[in-house]
Amino acid sequence: MSDANNIHTTHFSCACRQVTGSFKAHDRDLPLPLTLCHCNTCRHQSGLLCVSCATLPKGAEFEVSSGSLEFYKASNTVFRFFCKTCGANVYVEDTETEKRDICTGVLGDMDGIGSLKNHIFVADSKDGGLRDWIPNVDAWDGFSKVSKILDAGWKEDSMASSQSARELQAYCHCKGVRFKITRPDDSSAKINAPRGDIVGPPTTEPDGSKDDGAWWLRENGTKYLGGTCACNECRLASGSDIQAWAFVPKANIQQLNGRPLDFSAGTLKRYDSSEGVYREFCSKCGATVFWHSDSRPDLIDVSVGLLDAEEGARAESWLGWKTERVSFEEEAHNKDLISRLSVGLKRWGETKVPPSAEKHELGDEQAESDSKKKLKTGGPD
């Protein structure tokens, strides 16, 4: 049999579909090793809790067939390429090692293409970050094989808290985007926002009205909701299989000088992912920053990897994480990864929250809300 018959072609594209391409790999090299990187650079450059990349075999045929890519020099030898229109991270090149990593969120097919092998630079997260939700995979202090595997007690000397802090700063890697979040106040619960898929559809009252409640607030209104999303639009716009959002009232997001949030400040660039749905990213380094929509203008989704909480990447003194569900899990592209995330989140949540603590924050999950149907296109919720 000809060796050419054993070559597999995998296509990729971003959210706006302007960047397309492909790579070829021999069957013997598949599945490619998939790595979740938690380093400070990756978090702030992507805006995500971690980035998911698959390493291409050395010498693999790789082609960007259409579209315009921006590149960001993350270090002396590492270059990150992202779509200049929608901000999707597409691939990373290291000129010293000649290694190329493809961002798995843009791949057209994941079946048999990639398999999770390692968490790397987990210590940078301080609190374990997303690694605690996808356990049973080696967690390395730095690069795999050349650093050390973290033991069960590695966090004991690193845990801190910003519980007393009144402001939380956030920024992308190039610092072209910088802003701050303030603690929830009396006004934080008074906005109107259709309930997001992350908490399920709104509760229907006996009189036929729907009680959405302040679903974006947690722990008696002292924290904001944090959640994960696996929808196709978030995946394609970020370049990663897992998008983590913090749901924050617009009034609680400010420029560093205390002025109201400005979607045109610094290096922010807007991508209209569908009618009435908007995403902002850093036009210089490619970090995912915000999601918002005309149907809920007063509540903003903030990409969690930008946050600079003292206690770590999950910012638990600011966010109460939704652990019962992954938003739009049914759309999962990398079904194995998202299934593991879903199971891991639930188990982690059981160790963090008493069973009755969040009962008042959950809605009736028997029917899909009209707001979810309207926002699903281009919306993480």
Image (cartoon, rainbow, N blue to C red):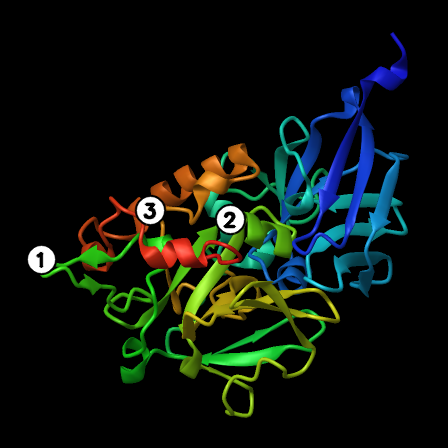
Q: Residue at x 44, y 59 (%)?
A: 375
Badge 1: few (under 14), some or many (20 or more) residues near its Cα, within 10 Å?
Answer: few
Residue 28 vs residue 294: left or right? right
Badge 3: few (under 14), some or many (20 or more) residues near its Cα, within 10 Å?
Answer: some
Which of the marked residues, 1 or 3, is nearer the chain's N terminus? 1
Task: Give the label on residue 284, or none.
Answer: none
- Which residue corresponds to mark 1? 206
Kind of residue at disc 3? Glu
Helix, strand or loop at label 2? It is loop
Kind of residue at disc 1? Pro
Q: Is residue 304 above or below residue 242?
A: below
- Asked whether 21 or 217 is in front, the reply is 21
- Asked whether 12 or 51 is in front, the reply is 12
- Which residue corresponds to mark 3? 324
Check if mark 1's residue and mark 3's residue have beta carbons within 8 Å: no
Badge 2: few (under 14), some or many (20 or more) residues near its Cα, within 10 Å?
Answer: many
Dot in front, 2 or 1: 1
Q: How many discs mark residues in the rendered view?
A: 3
Q: Residue at x 34, y 65 (%)?
A: 194
Kind of residue at disc 2? Cys
What x and y, as percent, mark residue 42?
Answer: 67, 58
Helix, strand or loop at label 1? It is loop
What x and y, as percent, mark residue 249?
Answer: 40, 76
- Which residue corresponds to mark 2? 231
Dot in front, 3 or 2: 2
What x and y, as percent, mark residue 261?
Answer: 52, 84
Q: Residue at x 20, y 56 (%)?
A: 203
Residue 134 vs residue 93: left or right? left
Dot in front, 1 or 3: 1
Q: Is residue 140 above or below residue 30?
A: below
Q: Quadrant of residue 115?
A: top right
